[in-house]
Amino acid sequence: MHRALMHILLAFWVGLASVPATAGLSEGYVAFTAGDYQIALDELLPLAGRNDSIAAYYVGLMYLEGKGVRPDTRVGIVWLTRAAERGHVAAQFRLAVAYDGSGTRQDYQLAAQWMLAAAEGGHADAQYYLGQYYRDGKGVVQSDQRAYEWIHRSVEYGRTHDRFLDALLYLGAVSEWGRGRRQDLVAAYKWFALAASYSLDDFRIHDEAGRAMDALSLRMSPSQLAQAQRLAEAWRRDGSIDAADGDTASAALMPGG
């Protein structure tokens, strides 16, 4: 019998018995992060077999990425799916990435399904990618409005996710040209200014944002530029979330707005 399938069956058998006192999530996690994958597997596999979503997530990663075991995409997907079905947000996101073509057969509908689950669970990267799915009509019905909404939400949920800077550029572009929302040059300048300020270590983003700001400034009045700069500074200071019906709606709350 395939060794990986033996591991799955063993997990179920062990789950019927008492788990050794030394076994546990903390031990498995510490071993995983230290790169001691065989120890991690020994600790986590019995718990995964007893439907622990966290343990199932890490076991799935080990099989999917070949950490401590021979890579086995099929077995990795089995464990990640078990974790995802129990609401593990990181597992939902990793499954979406896998079905997008990075790890298993490409299935955009399944990718979108799991990306939506992770996005609704607050995963900022998933929110960004789900927005891209809606922009491109990949696995979902194309919608510029839904694309804007999800990518906008991604920057509200976190400033450190992997595609944060790209999200800011996207929000600036769609606000400038009115794709998925009404055209708003003040909001566009604000998003580009934020992209420029957060990208000092990323020349590509910094340069693109600066060029966009220069071009926009030729189309805006001095009062519009001042308003955009106030909004950008407020966002940097306290991460204020824009009003649902328009970024510049919050200007009235600003000094001089």
Image (tube, grey):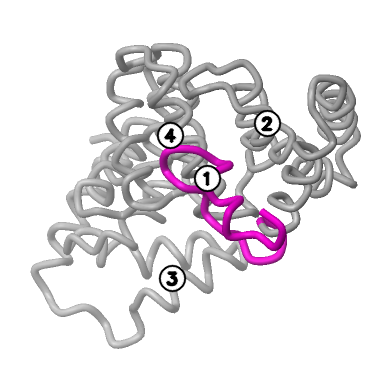
The residue tagged 1 is 249
N-term mark: 2 or 4 = 4
Check the image and report above or below for 249 versus 20.
above
Give the amino acid at mark 3.
Gly
Check the image and report above or below for 175 versus 191.
above
The image position of residue 41, as x and y in percent, is 41, 61
The residue mark sitting in front, 2 or 4, is: 2
Residue sitting at the far left: 16
**Alpha carbon separation for disc pair 3 and 4:** 38 Å
The residue mark sitting in front, 1 or 4, is: 1
Is 248 part of what is drawn in magenta? Answer: yes
Check the image and report above or below for 166 versus 92.
above
- In percent of the image, x 48 and y 29: which residue is there? 148
Q: Is mark 2 on a helix, strand or loop?
A: helix
**Alpha carbon separation for disc pair 2 and 4:** 15 Å
**Alpha carbon separation for disc pair 1 and 4:** 16 Å
The residue tagged 3 is 28
The residue tagged 2 is 188
The residue tagged 4 is 149
The image position of residue 42, as x and y in percent, is 38, 66
**Alpha carbon separation for disc pair 2 and 1:** 14 Å
